[in-house]
Image (cartoon, helix red, strand yellow):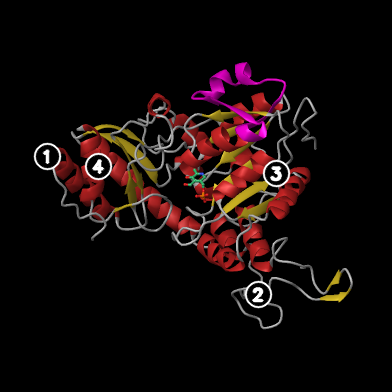
Amino acid sequence: MAVSNDSESVVTPPRAPSPAYGFGTLAVHAGAPHDPTTGAVIEPISLSTTFKQSSVGQPVGEYEYSRSSNPNRDNFQAAVAALEHAKHALAFASGSAATATILQSLASGSHVISVSDVYGGTHRYFTQVAKAHGVNVTFTPQIEIDIAEHIRDNTRLIWIESPSNPTLRLVDIRAVATAAHARGVLVVVDNTFLSPYVQNPLDHGADIVVHSVTKYINGHSDVVMGLAACNSDELRNRLAFLQNAGGAVPSAFDSWLAHRGVKTLHLRVKQSTINATAVAKALEASPHVISVNYPGLDSHPQRAIALKQHRDGMGGGMLSFRIKGGRQAAERFCQLTKIYTLAESLGGIESLVELPSAMTHAGIPQADREAVGVFDDLVRISSGIEESEDLVRDVEQALIGAVNSTKANGSNGTNGSA
Ligand SMILES: Cc1ncc(COP(=O)(O)O)c(C=O)c1O
């Protein structure tokens, strides 16, 4: 395979052999060996930071020091690699650390092309950190259309989020990968919003898939972690070297927790999708709503991409919508929900609501965020795994309350008090 910064073309590495088992079986069993000494069905947490050597340079087993590798991290990585159809996966201390490590793998003077509406923290890293290390990023809202005009001789990487955060725009990964590979450029897809249950970017030609494990993969809002997966040995080794050198690794306990979380990923994402679909339809039918962004709806402008790229055309658990009544109504909505909690983050079992312009995306200049649809009246919802009927009722009462009460100021919010 050829993945070289100097080469003129990138050959997408062949994907790992198709797994013999379905997703749910792999989620439960991949990377989950029974303990060879005790027979424990669930792996023990391996807290030791260091491992005995029988003679100098001869570890008793395969481990030496836990920053470099640890049994719980290895098992978790094996599980997610199987689910992402990847040969390799590397877990990091956060999704942001995975992003930073990929950007650090580029030489000074490199150029990156990114979709415009990326996660706010990714935008911050690209514009305020990568730039300081001589890596420049061009943002484009329509990457499939203008990729050719943005690629320069020093372009090394294309960064895609599909769906994007928080406007749920989709990108045709195969189309971008084909154009990028013809010019020797690698493609990275942040798959956080869908999880490997709904989308496997490597199958569509991406070279690296990244996750904020903090979200769907762990799924219980109690671990901060990230992950990068790929099929190329060379890429894996480059990232693993930087991971060990930089040291942004997750703890054994967090690896164990995230591994426990991923075992129910398929069940959680199925229910989140059912809930998001029901809520998106209710929002679309409401007179208090300007527009709804949800890739599971036929009205989504890129529904055809969802049908091609997502499992069974699923829309996933995330959606956003513009409420009538401006910023004030949007804020009131976020305070009036009883089941949804007003909080950042997403992908957990509990439903969350937030105002991107004032929270997750506040760091992006207003003109830049409005250019990609992040207006002050845009509300983002992360659907948990509660009952659909309860969530729909909650959204409907909050909509009515928010739009009516924008006339009367003041807040008696009951958010998250169900
Ligand atoms: C799409 C996306 N990518 C990456 C990240 C960063 O992940 P972390 O918070 O684990 O560093 C986030 C965090 O919200 C995200 O939403």
Residue at numbered disc 3:
15
Is residue 6 placed above or below 335 in the rendered structure?
Answer: above
Callout 1: helix, strand or loop? helix
x then y, percent, for residue 95: 55, 49
Tell whether circle 1 marks a residue whose Cβ is less than 8 angstroms from ligand 1.
Answer: no
Residue 90: image location, x then y, percent? 66, 53
Instruction: Estimate the spatial distance between the alpha carbons at disc 2 and disc 3, rounded to whole Å.
Output: 27 Å
Check disc 3: other Cα within 10 Å, few if <14, some if 14-19, many if 20+. Answer: some
What's the residue type where badge 2 is placed? His
**Label number found at residue 331:** 4
Q: Do the residues bearing badges 4 and 3 touch, measured as CB atoms within 8 Å?
A: no
Which residue has dot 1 on it? 404
Mark 2 → mark 4, Cα distance in angstroms: 49 Å
Q: Which residue is mark 2?
A: 34
Nearer-the-camera pick, 72 or 377: 377
Residue furthest top in the image = 149
- The kind of secondary structure element at disc 4 is helix
For marks 1 and 2 on the same chain, the one whose residue lies earlier in the sequence: 2
Q: Amino acid at mark 4?
A: Glu
Q: State how far apart marks 4 and 1 are (Cα).
A: 13 Å
Residue 406: in magenta span: no
Q: Quadrant of the N terminus?
A: top right
> Which mark is on residue 50?
none
Residue found at x 44% / y 53%: 269
Residue 144 belongs to magenta span: yes
Counting residues from the start of the chain, the first of labels 1 and 3 encountered is 3
Figure check: 118 above or below 55 = above
**In the image, 402: left or right of 54?**
left
For the magenta stretch, what is the residue range? 131-158
Per the model, the C-alpha gap separating discs 1 and 3 is: 54 Å
For the view shown, which residue lies furthest in the front direction? 132
